[in-house]
Image: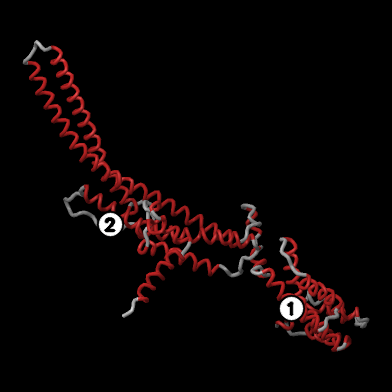
Amino acid sequence: MAQIDDMIANAARLAAFAQQRNVQLTPAQLTALLGATANAAALQMPGAAQEEFFAAYNATIHAVGLPNYAGFARCELVRPLLAEADVLLAFAAANGRKVDASVRNPIVATGVAVNTGVLTVDDEQQLRQAYEGLTVALAPVTVQTLAASETVLPGWSRAIFDFRSWSFGRFLNVAVFLVVLVVTCVTLSYYAEGTFGLSRYQDLSKTLADADKDLTAKASAKAGAALALAAAEKRPTEAAALAAAQKAAAEADAALNLARAAQKQAADEQEAIPARLSVWAARPCGQSATWIQQYFLCSEAQKAPLAAGSKATAADKLDAARAVAARLSGVYLLLMMGWLGAHAYILRSMSKAISERSFAPNAGFGHIVCVGMGALAGIASSWLLKPGDVGGAQWANLPVWALAFVAGYSTELVFAFMDRILGAFLDKKP
């Protein structure tokens, strides 16, 4: 089948070559050769049309002469290679890439020889040698990377937005990146809401402990002021001392009342937090939750009802919230941030490769592997690394999933550390 395709593709040029050689062809032969491309479907099937085409093709070969046809066949053999060389030369000229004359001139000379149908074995050898030098000069750019970098979206996309100037690979990766980014932002928002409540509860616990101490001190101060006032009242002749004692007692009483109000406000706020955290932790298990939330974020302990007559205590509600926050921080956010970091690296690499016209074809499998490795590196980073170990003191307070993003963007960060651990074991001598 491939041989028939080659014959059909070369038929019109063979007829033109015969006319250049002043070979007279019959009208039927000319019609069969010149109409081969239009009748390609019919010529693929055995029948009268195919037999007529074969007869015209073979008759033309014999009329031209086998030596001349060998030169013609050589021209057709190198024509695709010459077309690729022209594409690379055009790219070099348009992008300021220097190509030596010793490489460029044989390609141009071979093009002239191919167009005239006079191509020798030496010409072909010089072309192949020049093509090799051209690919070395322009590496890593090749005809394949140029084609992959210029692949555009189908025409239907223009009906929505004018995306035809985008490469399909870039569009697909940007779309996936945006989906992962939105999901990650939603998860971070949900996580921040719960962790803020837990953190606020801890802060209020410290505030209440300090308030108790302050309240005790102010109560003691009020008692002391009351004793001083009682002593001053026994000496009514000392008006100034009595006024000072009364003022001190009033100030001590006001300070105590303020401390009690602050303590009550903090206690009320702390008391309300477990209820809010309970609602937050139970959100993935609610009726409005998606099946993804219920499957991944709702544990069996949360789904299980309380025993008859029992009521969830504040400690129970806090524990449930801590469990959800731990799952998010220790698993899902690490996975998603590693995935997000890997996608960011892919988009950066793709943009650079496409701008340099060096985007490799069939790179999709490599991108899938990169995303998978990034997600794995994001999770493994929490096992092996701490932010302070990587970035020093200025990174010490960063959350672990921030390091997971860096690990996903550069998986070598985690794997280099793993190699160091492995090397430490292997270097130990028995």
Q: Where residue 414 appears, x then y in whole percent?
A: 42, 65
If the image is split into quadrants, where does the C terminus sit? bottom left
Q: Residue at x 15, y 34 (%)?
A: 216
Q: Is residue 233 visible?
A: yes
Q: Are marks 1 and 2 in contact (CB under 8 Å)?
A: no
Crowdedness near tag 1: few (<14), some (14–19) or many (≥20) residues, C-alpha within 10 Å: some
> Taking 315 as reference, is 120 above or below it?
below
SS class of the residue under badge 2? helix
What's the distance in space between the residues labelled 1 and 2, CA to CA? 72 Å
Q: Residue at x 25, y 49 (%)?
A: 317
Q: Where residue 114 appears, x then y in whole percent?
A: 82, 77
Q: Is residue 399 left or right of residue 210?
A: right
Name the residue furthest front.
Answer: 429
Name the residue furthest top.
Answer: 237
Q: Quadrant of residue 81?
A: bottom right
Tag count: 2
Q: Where residue 328 appears, x then y in whole percent?
A: 35, 56
> Taking 69 as reference, is 415 above or below it?
above
Q: Where residue 42 appears, x then y in whole percent?
A: 75, 78
Mark 2, residue position: 303
Q: Nearer the viewer, mark 1 or mark 2?
A: 1
Q: Residue at x 78, y 75 (%)?
A: 37
Mark 1, residue position: 129
Q: Amino acid at mark 2?
A: Lys
SS class of the residue under badge 1? helix
Q: Quadrant of residue 426?
A: bottom left
Return the residue nearer the eye: 31 or 386: 386
Q: Amino acid at mark 1?
A: Gln
Q: Is residue 291 visible?
A: no
